[in-house]
Amino acid sequence: MVIQTLAALWMAGTIAAPAAQTYHANKARKRFVSIHAEKQYVQPSAFEDHPLRELLGQEVNDVHLEPFHYRTKDNLTTVTVLEYSKPGYALGATIYPFGSSEGATLAIRGSIETAPTIHLRIDGPAAPVPTYDLTGGHAYDVGAGIEMSDRSPGWGIGGHSFLIGGIGRAQWDQRSGKRYFGEAGGGIMFGPFGVDIAVKYIVTQFDDPVPHGLRTIPICVRGTLTF
């Protein structure tokens, strides 16, 4: 009886061993291009310094319970924010030269974005112009960085994260400027489709009417299609 039992166990192990040795988990195929559309919620950053302090040539403070929003340190010049639009939109594409499947890979991204509309009224002796306007704005960005991905085969759930930096050009009806940005984010994927959330920090520099800059932080909700 013992011999028969041992023989049966040996035969079962012999049959099962090759199957165990040849089993491999399915891996997601590499994907090389991702296109996206996104909505942005643009937040100003250090607005009293960029552009106000640079435009007015002195320290600027925000105020409350006044008909204006900012005032220079000497109390002689005031700034009223008539409009600062926060929603924005973008279209773009990311290229993975070495493919994106599992682990780290190079990501090269380009995008076309709307830029915020800004209307300011400036009253006082420090004003370089009585109004400061940015309307009809759009920007072109290109950047490169690293993506960490864990894609699933078929329609399984996967995820990824990324860190990208780059340069761009912004154009409004009144003036244009060069941009520098850094972006970080991540999301989940269902086969070729995905949803990302990203935060972007943008520095835009102008020469007109005096050298000054603009800092913005778009919070992006992005739909992607990767193939």
Image (spheres, helix red, strand yellow):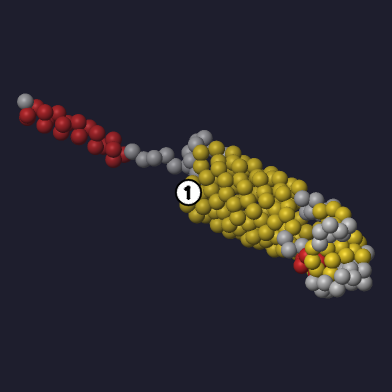
Among the 4 quarters of the image, the one containing residue 195: top right
Q: Is residue 119 visible?
A: no
Q: Which residue is mark 1?
A: 102
Give me the residue at 53% from left, 48% from top.
160
Seen from the viewer's position, the closer of residues 164 and 19 is 164
- Image position, residue 104 (x, y; %): 50, 54
Image vertical order of residue 95 relative to residue 132, above or below: above
| Residue drawn where x is 84% and y is 66% of the image | 71
Q: Is residue 151 shown above or below 125?
A: above
Closest to the observer, 93 or 221: 221
Pointer 1 local density, CA inside 10 Å: few below 14, some 14–19, many at least 20: some
Residue at position x 77%, y 50% in the image: 86
Tell which of 98 and 101 is nearer to you: 101
Indicate the amino acid at tag 1: Glu
Q: Is residue 3 above or below residue 49?
A: above
Q: Left of 187 or right of it: where is 66? A: right
